Image (spheres, rainbow, N blue to C red):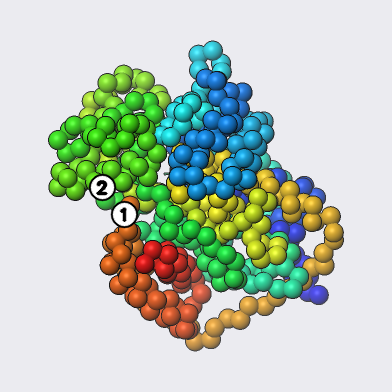
Amino acid sequence: MDISDIQNYYDAIIVGAGAGGLYTALSLPETAKILVICKREPTVCNSHLAQGGIAAVYKPVDDDNTSLHTNDTFVAGGFKNNPDSVKILVTQAAQEIQHIIDIGVDFDRDDTGEYDRTLEGGHSRRRIFHHKDSTGAEITRAIREAVLARDNITFLDNALMCRLEKLDSGFAADVLKDDVHTTYTAPYVVLATGGIGRVYEYTTNTAIATGDGITAAYELGAQITGLSLIQFHPTAYHDKARECFLISESVRGEGAHLLNCHKERFMQKYDERLELAPRDVVSHFIMVEAKETGSDEFYLDITHEDRDYLAARFPMIFEFLLTQGIDMSKDLIPVYPCQHYLMGGINVDTSARTDIDGLYAVGECSHTGVHGNNRLASNSLLEALVFGHRAADDISAKLTTPTEPFSYTFEEPADAVHIPTGLRTEIRRIMQQAYFVIPDKEQARTGFERVLEINKLLEQGNFIIDRDYVEAKSLATVAYIILKEII
Ligand SMILES: Cc1cc2nc3c(=O)[nH]c(=O)nc-3n(C[C@H](O)[C@H](O)[C@H](O)COP(=O)(O)OP(=O)(O)OC[C@H]3O[C@@H](n4cnc5c(N)ncnc54)[C@H](O)[C@@H]3O)c2cc1C
């Protein structure tokens, strides 16, 4: 066997370096040879953007306990959650919070030195650990630093997984970095590729969220569950940018009111939980109110709070709004719903195993069933850690049986051409019209026909396998599965 084949053979390949992928890598034994890849810079991922925090019953305050966290998770999820996964999520939470504190995550504390917990929509107790309003950046910073300090982990950024093949002895991944394709092999692969937000015109998600891992798993025949279970966050900053800035749930948690175009509160007409009803409920009633008032103007009002408090509690949001000419202590914040999160994904069991032997999925690309029909705020970072750890435990147990290195060669298409331009824009427009908060069946049916054609074109054409192709194919596949579910 060629020496380069052995060099490119790993015990496990982890595709994705957000909270899910990084924490899986860190939880694997230091004796295992691990490859972690991410397709852009390490901070370009949804985990980095997480503002509000991470929910957990850890050294609880406020009479909190895991039964209450369980109940809140079920209520938000419409009782469609998987009870086994929820039980694991809430009971394993304390262990993972302790671990990330041990590796240096700096959660905010109150004047007494206790961890400060905030409240978010759907939570009956203050249980959201946070680092100002940039919790995800802090958590991934600490985990990434711990991962980079490990000699057994190779970390490649700007490395795109283009193709994934299942072989008798494991998997081969075709990875494109600096315009060069390299094949890596391993008996185990963990997909931690994040969400699908970029299939919409407007989303809070980063540019990486094109559903590449879901597409790779789908092509290998893995079960994909509930891909139309999409969360539309009620309060994105309303400026019609493709990547919408999120005005975190915790702003409402700290008392912001939601106003309609007449600058009047309206949630009391629809739900007794008012602004702190779960996200799907608030987004739904924003759409209902928009129809009633004939306007898509909505605002958050937290002007009753002190300026210094807001600047200290929400520094990132405060600064961002100032760049838009808005002082949140004096001005209303224009908001509107926006694609935010995917509850469905690659179906996995409670050890994050897909139904393809050796293939795992963790984080937002997976469907553990913890979220049911609607994710409870701040449960997703927790899900990424808990199930990332469980995937690592399962792989660790299997690694005790030695495996032989193997190699594989992907076919390179000859005389291939670049994909036609405009396909991704077209898919985004279709999805925005067909399914934004409330599905439009008529638009979904016509959109589905066009998405079928685009899928056929991408499958049958002789295209150069580059980032444009991979992401267009992912968006087309994801749109196809979502629309098929709703028509
Ligand atoms: C604005 C915003 C705020 C949020 N706030 C919160 C919050 O307060 N609390 C909370 O719990 N959740 C929050 N969420 C949700 C949460 O951040 C995500 O669900 C979670 O972090 C997802 O982690 P992940 O590891 O699955 O994916 P990501 O963190 O998105 O990481 C995906 C990784 O996969 C890589 N990747 C993708 N495709 C490929 C490919 N083909 N080849 C190689 N690499 C690939 C990417 O480069 C990236 O490294 C928020 C989300 C957003 C967008």
First along the sequence among labels 1 and 2: 2
Left or right relative to 41: residue 305: left
Image: 275 above or below 239: above
Q: Is disc 1 placed on a helix, strand or loop?
A: strand
What residue is rendered at 24% in x and 46% in y? 288
Badge 1 is on which residue? 438
**What's the distance in space between the residues labelled 1 and 2, CA to CA?**
8 Å
Residue 57 quadrant: top right
Q: Nearer the viewer, residue 45 or 268?
A: 268
Q: Position of residue 414 (x, y in %)?
A: 53, 86
Q: Residues within 10 Å of mark 1 (few under 14, many from 20)?
A: few
The kind of residue tagged 1 is Ile
Image: 67 above or below 33: above
Mark sitting on residue 287:
2
The kind of residue tagged 2 is Met
What residue is rendered at 39% in x and 29% in y? 253
Left or right relative to 16: residue 470: left
Q: Position of residue 201 (x, y in %)?
A: 32, 58
> In the orientation shown, which residue stands out farthest toward the front?
79
Q: Are marks 1 and 2 in contact (CB under 8 Å)?
A: yes
Q: Position of residue 149 (x, y in %)?
A: 69, 43
